[in-house]
Image (spheres, rainbow, N blue to C red):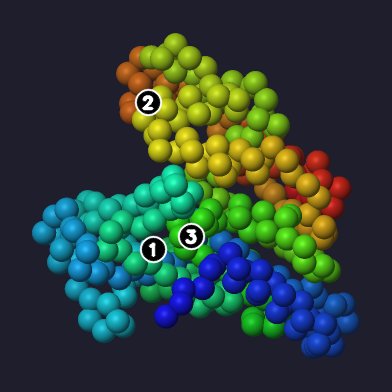
Amino acid sequence: METTNPLRAVVLLSAVVVMLSLSSCCASSAGGGQLLHPVILIPGSGGNQLEARLTDDYRPSTLTCRLWPPVRGRGGWFRLWFDPSVLLAPLTRCFAERMMLYYDRDADDYRNAPGVQTRVSEFGSTSTLRYLDPTIKLLTGYMDTLASTLETAGYEEGHTLFGAPYDNGRRKWSGCTDIVAVTIRDTFSLELHYLLFFTCLIVCMLPAPRVFGNTTLVVSERHNRTYSAKNVTQFLQDIGFAEGVEPYRARTRPLGEVLPEPGVPVSCLVGTGVDTVESLVFGEEGFDAGPVKVVYGDGDGTVNLASLDAATSLSAIELFV
């Protein structure tokens, strides 16, 4: 069976949403008669419910990994993320080796570990975005409050409210950064008012030189070196993550260097007033020992204010703080 390219699927979903909104504008109106633009909720890289299946090529590192989980039915598919078992020490190792991605420099592509197949389910629906694990809703709420609030405002699941979960490690798929890239680069004439909620993979969250310039972000006393957005490749090498250099050069940095107008109006909702890391200082024991000093500033708890404000450089983006 042919595997659907998830990036193309998101674009196709967007096109379908536009056609639906044009063909049923009356049904897409809120109680007061206001036309509701379709909303596609896109989770962060940790907000996708992932399933996995192990083939004969899988080589478990331990007997525990060979036996867990005991899969019966469903074609061998089991929940990979999020599942409470990942918090148990013997099973955390199994989870890590199954989530491991390998970068193929020649193909500029990430691949799963041998013998590990992954997938997302319910593409187009918000059902898998509302909770990280629907069996423990009380503890794993994710986008349920957001989706429920939109429904209260008149949005309808499958009609004006959609979800676009993705397997963030597959087929040149760098999570939401690639979705934004498609919005920017594609030639679709979609008069669609996008409401995007997104975070990205760690490499995709590295600071852009055009935003942070020469500002010192990390200090290493052991290496007697400071790091800014302009020497990220040196930082990746010094922390022992040399395999991240090429993806950063090929994918992340070019996207941040030139950010053309998206061609459609975009609403960017950001949070502020939460202590957010701005810089880190590592001592003589090196990076593995953790930072000896953390400097905080304003932001949303994950992304600092400098990054949040970067969106205002585009005239088509309306920023809501």
Q: Residue furthest top?
A: 224
State how far apart marks 3 and 1 are (Cα).
22 Å
Q: Position of residue 105 (x, y in %)?
A: 44, 45
Q: Position of residue 18 (x, y in %)?
A: 76, 77
Location of mark 3 (residue): 171
Of the two numbered discs 3 and 1 in the rendering, the one whose residue sits closer to the viewer: 3
Q: Position of residue 106 (x, y in %)?
A: 44, 47
Residue displayed at 30% across by 63% down: 116
Location of mark 1 (residue): 82
The first of marks 3 and 1 along the sequence is 1
The kind of secondary structure element at disc 3 is loop
Q: In the depicted view, which residue is nearer to us: 313 or 116?
A: 116
Residue type of the residue flagged with mark 3: Arg
Q: In the depicted view, which residue is nearer to us: 215 or 174?
A: 174
Q: Residue furthest right?
A: 33
Q: Residue furthest front?
A: 106
Q: Position of residue 71 (x, y in %)?
A: 23, 76
Quadrant showing the N terminus:
bottom left
Q: In the depicted view, which residue is nearer to us: 31 or 309?
A: 309
